[in-house]
Amino acid sequence: AQKITQTQPGMFVQEKEAVTLDCTYDTSDPSYGLFWYKQPSSGEMIFLIYQGSYDQQNATEGRYSLNFQKARKSANLVISASQLGDSAMYFCAMINLISNFGNEKLTFGTGTRLTIIP
Amino acid sequence: DAGVTQSPTHLIKTRGQQVTLRCSPKSGHDTVSWYQQALGQGPQFIFQYYEEEERQRGNFPDRFSGHQFPNYSSELNVNALLLGDSALYLCASSPGQARYGYTFGSGTRLTVV
């Protein structure tokens, strides 16, 4: 079974500072993918960044980067130069990449509420 | 390019009633998954539909059922509603073989009273 743990229920960060959101995972699958999603108050899950377990380099997407430490089973999200619009819930999620179907379910953590202070 | 569309956006039902939620996937996507997100929690996988068949199912009772139509749109039905079914229901679509091309809708907020 897969499990995602996000230990920070809430964080407050000054605008323009960098922020790290923690995520640890547990899985017995040899091949897996890790996601970060942003959920504003509107409810929609917005894809931010993806890391495959066999990717050699840490993923980056604009101001977002994923600090992937496979041995520690951690996949922390780093947001550089935070903006007021970054205030939202952030979810870490995992997927099993070995399946007969091609599309597997996502397993989510409980999320971190990030508030950017002007 | 329209993303995932869900309807209705909000719904209030009485305990014991039945409800149907609807989802239109993103253009080009043929797989639809449904998730339940209780207040303060992460989304939980309900089931996934592909080629009009339920392909995977999470730990949800048979009161939760679904359907996928030939145009890939989908419905989620919940019978005999319980207070605990109050949640945000999210639909996600993806291309058939793309393991990480998930696009989510804005969800349907269901309140059971």
Image (tube, rainbow, N blue to C red):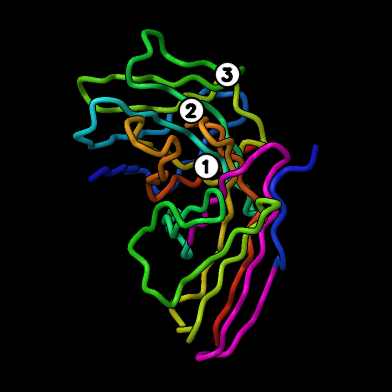
Q: Nearer the viewer, residue B46 or A116?
A: B46
Residue that label 3 marks: A61
Is label 2 or label 3 in front?
A: 3
Residue type pointed to by label 3: Glu
Q: CA distance from mark 1 to mark 2?
A: 9 Å
Residue A19 numbered mark, or none: 2
The C terminus of chain B: image quadrant: bottom right
Residue type pointed to by label 2: Val
Question: Would residue A104 be found to the left or right of residue B101 on screen?
Answer: left
Q: Is residue A88 visible?
A: no
Q: Position of residue A12 (x, y in %)?
A: 50, 40
Q: CA distance from mark 2 to mark 3?
A: 15 Å
Q: Position of residue B71 (x, y in %)?
A: 71, 52
Q: Position of residue A51 (x, y in %)?
A: 42, 22
Question: To which quarter of the image does residue A29 belong?
Answer: top left
The reply to whether the C-beta atoms of the residues labelled 1 and 2 are less than 8 Å apart is: yes
Q: Nearer the viewer, residue B75 or A26?
A: B75
Q: Which residues are magenta?
A: B10-36
Is label 1 or label 3 in front?
A: 3
Q: Residue at x 52, y 42 (%)?
A: A114
Q: Residue at x 38, y 13 (%)?
A: A55
> Dot 1: few (<14), some (14–19), or many (≥20) neighbours within 10 Å?
many
Residue A114 numbered mark, or none: 1
Q: Nearer the viewer, residue B38 or A21?
A: B38
Q: Earlier in the sequence, mark 2 or mark 3?
A: 2
The N terminus of chain B: image quadrant: top right
> Dot 2: few (<14), some (14–19), or many (≥20) neighbours within 10 Å?
many
Q: Residue at x 53, y 48 (%)?
A: B50
Q: Does residue A118 belong to the magenta stretch?
A: no
Q: Residue at x 58, y 78 (%)?
A: B111
The reply to whether the C-beta atoms of the residues labelled 1 and 3 are less than 8 Å apart is: no
